[in-house]
Amino acid sequence: MKTTLDINDELLATAKALAARQRTTLTRLIEEGLKLRLNAWQGAAPRGKLRLPVFKGRGGLVAGIDPLSNRSLLEALGDDT
């Protein structure tokens, strides 16, 4: 399949030089790079359900602190400026 890409001039020049040194085509070099990137991405994809840690401890806010009030929280921190 043919497609059109916008590639940075320096990157393209470097890729062409590498392809020439390796006696391959620019197309083949780009395909190899894309395959490597896709394989790395597919290998890193999580499998199954992701489990998040859940804190099951006791505790909570100190009595008298209103969690819906910034003033109450700042006063509890001692930063009531």
Image: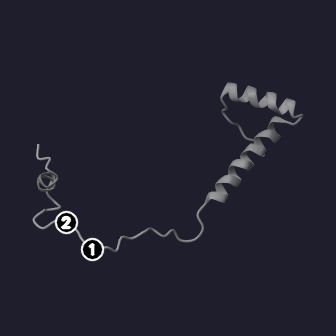
Q: Which residue is rendered at x = 15% and y = 53% of the image?
A: 70
Q: Quadrant of the C terminus?
A: top left
- The percent coordinates of residue 53 (x first, y second) are 43, 68
The residue at the far right in this view is 23
77 vs 40, left or right, is left
74 vs 31, left or right, is left
Residue 61 is marked as: 2
Q: Secondary structure at mark 2?
A: loop
Q: Which residue is rendered at x = 79% and y = 39% of the image?
A: 29
**Based on the displayed image, in which of its 4 quarters is residue 10 positioned?**
top right
In this orientation, which residue lies closer to the viewer: 2 or 44? 44
Residue linked to disc 1: 58
Residues packed near mark 1 inside 10 Å, few (<14), some (14 to 19) or many (20 plus) = few
Q: Secondary structure at mark 1?
A: loop
- The percent coordinates of residue 64 (x first, y second) are 10, 65
- The percent coordinates of residue 22 (x first, y second) are 87, 34
- Marks 1 and 2, how far apart in space? 10 Å
**Based on the displayed image, in which of its 4 quarters is residue 9 positioned?**
top right
- The percent coordinates of residue 3 (x first, y second) are 73, 41
Q: What colour scheme has been applied to the protein in the rendered image?
A: one colour
| Vertical side of 21 occupied by 76: above or below | below
In this orientation, which residue lies closer to the viewer: 43 or 38? 43
21 vs 77, left or right, is right
* Dot 1 amino acid type: Arg
Residues packed near mark 2 inside 10 Å, few (<14), some (14 to 19) or many (20 plus) = few
Q: Which residue is rendered at x = 66% and y = 58% of the image?
A: 42
* Dot 2 amino acid type: Leu
| Vertical side of 14 occupied by 39: above or below | below
